[in-house]
Amino acid sequence: MTTRDGILQDRAGAADQVRVEFILLLAFTISLVALSIDSMLPALSEIAADLGVTNPNDRQMVITVLFAGFGIAQIFYGPVSDSVGRKPVIYAGFLIFIAGSILCIFSGDFTTMLVGRFLQGFGAAGPRTVVVAMVRDRYEGRAMARIMSLVTSVFILVPVLAPSIGQGILLVAHWRAIFWMLLALGIVTSLWFALRQEETLPIERRRELSFARVFRAIAETFRSRVALGYMTATGLVFGAFIGYLASAQQIFQEMYGMGKLFPLCFGMLAVTFGAASLTNAKLVMRFGMRKLSHRALIGHTLLSLVFAAIAFYVEGKPPFLLFMAYMMGAFFLIGLLFGNFNAMAMAPLGHIAGVGAAVIGAMTTFISVGCGAVIGHAYQGTILPLGIGFAVLGVLSLAVTRWADGGHADAAE
């Protein structure tokens, strides 16, 4: 081997190492959202009992209020990050998340708990929103979809493990210890990010922060048929997912009587989602985002329609194994969608990546939280609301993506 070849190999190895750490760091940065949701699921009944919640479905607000704060905040973080850079905005998000965690730790009533959860969501929105813009700063098209799929596949380890972590904490400590764990995670991840991640938006590419510019960027995002269509479709599909998250503890522990096996069941479905993200990272470079995601959406919709019909026939109480088989199939197909849909929505917005990511993230969250809250609060001891929700939102997503493809001129393949 010549000296030149050795230098080239060293540089390639160093580049690969940097990219791996970039993916791992971004995955852990956005994991605040998933861990804040999923580690809490086994504790919902205890939180409700301790804080005087009487309506069983009101416990779901511990989940949905976090999403509300998450959705509202995104519209602020993106434009600011386009002006001052990505890192300062992420620091601000971490600080707000830490403050919300402290409030939850010392909450003495349900209202205080919900305020803390709102702040956790508001803070976690900073890292989650700006991470998408950071990826867009470096990659575009299929390459961006691949990176986002790899980030998601690492990130998915969190929902696999989080319920078990929450359940394990409950075995040896009070539910407030879960919030101590979230506080520690926020501090450690923020330090890692500060020490190891460089700024991805150079000064010469930053834009002046002004209401007029932000308004123009928002308007441009909504005028793009591709961006509007795919962020709406993402929100609809994710709405069914939030409906599942909100009612998962009741379905597994109360309806099916899984008890302490709930984290295992939840983790199995999360593994399916992660496997789909890894599969997508490999297939998207070969088949393209549109073809792969559309076929997955069609399969998901047809599967959900069949399952909804079966659920209706058995009065909303299908055998547990049938329920798990359907959810694993649905989660795998949904896992083929998210990275691609997000990348396709961002494709025409590279020059306004911060605002674009913020608008897409906010609108996706608003749509999904609204749909998910309806599905969750419709829970009445059966999985019928969930089955119907998956089917109806699948049909609507399919219609919206068909409409969006009419604007394929500014879409990525």
Image: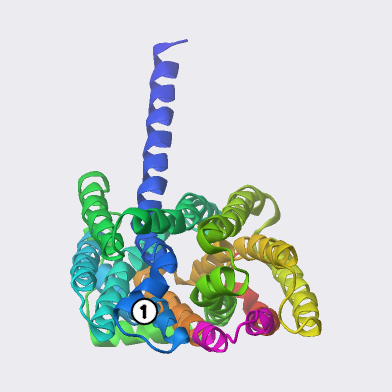
Give the residue furthest to the top: 1
Choose between 140 and 251: the one closer to the eye: 251
Is 372 contained in the magenta span?
A: yes
Image x and y of residue 69, in percent: 33, 79
Is 152 drawn above or below residue 347 in the view shown? above
Is 322 drawn above or below residue 144 in the view shown? below
Image x and y of residue 153, in percent: 52, 51
Looking at the picture, the colour scheme in use is rainbow
Image x and y of residue 131, in percent: 36, 60
**Amino acid carrying mark 1 in the image:** Ala
Image x and y of residue 21, in percent: 37, 42
Is 1 drawn above or below residue 102 in the view shown? above
Choose top left, top right, bottom left or bottom right for residue 135. Answer: bottom left
Judged by its main secondary structure, the magenta piece is: helix
Choose between 277 and 380: the one closer to the eye: 380
**Residue appearing at x 49%, y 76% in the figure:** 246
Question: In the rendered image, which residue does mark 1 sit on?
Answer: 48
Segment tinted magenta in the rendering: 371-389
Where's the C terminus, which quadrant? bottom right
Is residue 241 something that shows in the picture?
no
Is 28 drawn above or below residue 246 in the view shown? above
Q: Secondary structure at mark 1?
A: helix
Total number of numbered labels? 1
